[in-house]
Image: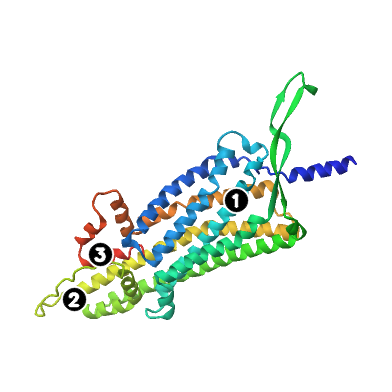
Amino acid sequence: MDSYNQSNNNSFLRSLLRLDWNQFAVPVNGFLMPLIAVVTLVNNALVLAILLRRQMRSPTNALLTALAVSDTLTIVCPVPCFVHFYTFGRRYLDWVPYSWCFAWFCFTDYLPTVFHTASIWLTVSLAVQRYVYVCCPVGSTLRRRLCTMHSTILVIVGVYLAAIASQVCRFGELTFSSVRVPSLLNSIHDDDELNGTAVVEVTACRYEMTPFLARYTTVYYSIYYWSRVLLIHVIPCSSLVILNTSLIRTMRAAHQRRYQLTSKPKTTSANRSQTVIEADASASQYEMQTLTSLPHVPEVPAPAASTPSPPCHHAVTTGSRSDSSSRATMMLVIVVGVFLIVEVPLSVLLLFVIIENTFVVDLFNDATRHTTALLVNCCIAITYPLNFFIYCTMSERFRNMFCDLFSRRTNDSNTSLLPVSTRRSARIELD
């Protein structure tokens, strides 16, 4: 009878919500994550202030805007819970109060997973769009359909709806109730009380599976986690590896072709200019697509017919366009590469956890699993504010717009003083 009561008591305690903590939980969740959240919020606010300007509107920048929003919400959502339990006091040592039941699961698990899922598939969409820009023919149907603002907005809305749909079941899988239990943290000592000790009780949170899911717990979690690891981690990461590799190879091949064509000694300047134009047709067409959103610029009068234009002028302009397009592609390759560096370890860790639960094997002990998950999530969070610095480093257009935010001169007045070719070259920097 005593062993039966002890078993029931252990089962009851396991149903109470208590934070998993170790030596890294307080410094990471209590101090590092809030700091990263503040930096991410500031950096991505600057990114949004720049990308949402009229001069920067384009399909690629629309995806970058949605990605900045998703990354910010992913890191900001759990911060209130982390600050309350880890930053101030020692609340993480006690039971989680009933008033924080749903909030803890919602803000530290459900909502971050929704926004992180959106970030993953927005990154895939960004890589697919850039691949179509670079590798598909100029007049292809795929390029006309996918590389427009209308289709990009539909992709963004579809990604968010799919991310919500993939996690909507999580919001109703648990039921919560309040129970009075002895506190793990506080006790009042009084010699007048029984045994000199009076136990302080707190209102703790008890969570259980809903009756329907309780009957099919194994099936439910197997379907959910296997579909999650495949659709949200393995397939997107594999697709990004393939797309990134293809983009890098295409950029190298295009660079080698341009180098070979421009280094031929017997090729005249006019022929070399024409050859470079043909080699960079996709970049030129992409530039024309983005220029449709520019304000009207008065045309520069053409020189007299008797005065031939310098044969190298067109080649220089085209070369600057090609360089701009190459920098934009390289910038997106770096963004995707940084994303993969931290996402692949998370995918592997989640796959190991699913294998443990599915086949009932122990690959890690609880302490190792919790510590690894904590550090991997921290590494992912560190990458959220990095995109701002990547844009500043790789995009001259982005730097100019950033400086314009803190100057009295408007960007329109600055660009109106530049030659038309310079404005067109700068326009595609971030696209």
Label ID, residue 32:
none
The residue to which callout 2 is attached is 311
Type of amino acid at the residue the image marks with label 1: Cys
Q: Measured along the vertical axis of the image, is residue 192 above or below residue 99? A: above
Type of amino acid at the residue the image marks with label 2: Pro
C-alpha distance separating marks 3 and 1: 47 Å
Relative side of 237 to 39, left or right: right
Question: Which type of secondary structure does the marked residue at label 1 adopt?
Answer: helix
C-alpha distance separating marks 1 and 2: 64 Å
Whether residue 24 is visible: no
Q: Residues within 10 Å of mark 1 (few under 14, many from 20)?
A: some
Among the 4 quarters of the image, the one containing residue 301: bottom left
In this rendering, which labeled residue sits more in front, label 1 or label 2?
Answer: 1
Q: Residues within 10 Å of mark 3 (few under 14, many from 20)?
A: some
Question: Which type of secondary structure does the marked residue at label 2 adopt?
Answer: loop
Question: Where is residue 319 shown, x and y percent of the image?
Answer: 28, 70
Q: Nearer the viewer, residue 330 or 263?
A: 330
- Residue at 49% x, 63% y is 122
Question: Where is residue 15 shown, x and y percent of the image?
Answer: 73, 46
Among the 4 quarters of the image, the one containing residue 227: bottom right
Label ID, residue 106:
1
**In the current view of this chain or complex, which residue is farthest to the right?**
1
Relative side of 328 to 183, left or right: left
Question: Mark 3 or 1 closer to N-term?
Answer: 1
- Residue at 47% x, 68% y is 154
